[in-house]
Amino acid sequence: MKRMLWAVCRSFVFAGIAASALGAWAQVNPDLYAGLTWRNVGPFHGGRISAVSGVIGDPGTFYMGTPLGGIWKTTSGGVTWFPVFDEETSVDSIGAIQVAPSNPEIVYAGAGDPIQGSLGDGMWKSIDAGKSWQHIGLEDTVKISSIVVDPADANLVLVSALGDATRKGGGVYRSTDGGQNWTSVLKAADYDGLRDLQSSYDDPSVMLAVTQGTAGGFGGAPGGAQGKAKPALAFKSTDEGKTWSPVKIPPFPGRVAVAVAMHTEGQRMYIVGNNIEHGSGLYRSDDGGATWKHMAGKDTRISNGQGSYSSGVFVDTQNPDVLYTVSTAMYRSTDGGVTFEAFKGAPGGEDYHKQWIDPTNGKRMIVGTDQGASVTLDNGKNWSLWYTQTISQVYHVATDSQYPYWIMAAQQDTGGVMIKSRGTWGQVDFTDWSPLPSSEFGVITPDPKNPHILYGVGYGPGGGGNGLIKIDMTTGQWENVAPNFGADAPKYRAGRDFGKKFDTAFDPGALYVATSACW
């Protein structure tokens, strides 16, 4: 007879003070708020960017795609941004964007966030530089991750896409008529699609495509069809995507990104992934993918960072020995990947994802991070700010009982923020927002009796977001007051937030906190 051990988890509610009954929700007369109108109060801070592109030779014009905020455009080199996809209400998640090199009026966009969450509905196209959009098919591709447009022919387009949970829709698709018709040119059995697709601007016939491994960790892919982990696969085309052949690559268990260098006749290729057994996750080929050499030695910065959350390798358009990799910061090599130096960002939160480099001017580029998009016109000496981009991903919103009241929220990868409901100088801008010592996720809960006391979310045992913190805004001090803090930590389990609520009806001093207990 087999014995089976079950982990028993029970939900608990902890009361900060003696328990009292929760009051019923108060009914509010709709006439009291019938005259209210919406106004933008921010936060005036960028959020995660899932796609970037630019217009070749035009110093000021760039595009960025967001996971939940559609497409935005700048014509001022990143000084100001404006939305160009708001009229398309069927989808707001963008996974890839590409301006046609031969015609800046034509812009292609692929829907669906490849990293997490929001699904898309296929391909979109603008023929008037983003003023209007039309849907052009591939509805079954729920997450489009790459778009490649032929440098001379704006109608020749290829995309790589991930499918749904049944792997329907994933693969590489090709169109020769601007997206009116699509041909499936590459599938990978037992994988949910192709993650990255790249070619070089000066020789588009050579293309490299990769799947994602099925043991990707954070932000990675689920298990294979039989529940077994599978390494990433790579494929190469020498006829601009008509036919494909397998390419043997190092074993990467999760996300992989590739690049094909210009000025090398398609022979110089780079690949980066989360195989950091030997240090760096970067490999280079000088023979079109036939053999690969491990680069950057034991430099563990040069991997794909945080499991499969951020991954990318990008090559300078004038010099194949200059390349960039992304992780919690961006790093640059000027010797073909042998050594790297920090290029932009601070390891600890900016989290870089995307880069576009002008094929005709390697000094002009745009990068996309968890903090927003940033433009440089002088090879990184100066960058535009992301404090004019109202695209931050806010998980929850709370208000306190002060007058004017304060608005509090948690931003993805930027921590807690707060602002008075009225600006100091007649309008609300990014200077009115203040940081709040709470985590990037979870609900911020003000004490109804003392609005200067807030309860937020911190990092608890094991690095998870299960620490309940009490914040005194008069002193700036905070302490962990969670029931799973200290010796009792193993007894209780929580996700990225505690369910917490004050009893505002009968006993405003009673704070209820919900978590789980497992043994």
Image (tube, rainbow, N blue to C red):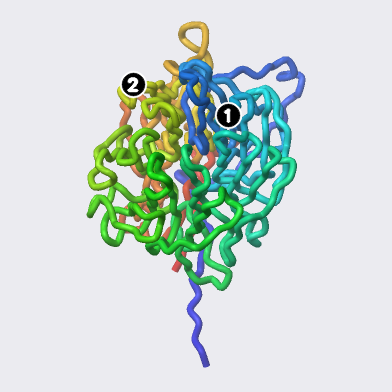
Q: What residue type is labelled 2?
A: Asn
Observer able to see residue 167 = yes
In this rendered view, identify the residue nearer to me: 88 or 207.
207
Numbered badge on residue 217: none
Secondary element at image label 2? loop
363 shown above or below 508: above
Q: What residue type is labelled 1?
A: Ser
Nearer to us of marks 2 and 1 is: 1
Residue 491 found in image quarter: bottom left
In this rendered view, identify the residue nearer to me: 332 or 44.
332
Q: Where is residue 118 in the image (x, y as percent from the top left)?
A: 61, 45
Could you tell whether 109 is left or right of 297 in the image? right
- Residue at which label 2 appears: 382
In this rendered view, identify the residue nearer to me: 485 or 197.
197
Could you tell whether 187 is left or right of 489 in the image? right
Q: How far apart are marks 2 and 1 (CA)?
A: 28 Å
Is disc 2 surrounded by few (<14), some (14 to 19) or many (20+) residues within 10 Å?
few
422 shown above or below 16: above
Quadrant where the C terminus lies? Answer: bottom left
In this rendered view, identify the residue nearer to me: 256 or 345.
256
Secondary element at image label 1? loop
- Residue at which label 1 appears: 102
Q: Which residue is drawn at 52% across and 21% down?
A: 61
Q: Position of residue 5 (x, y in %)?
A: 48, 78
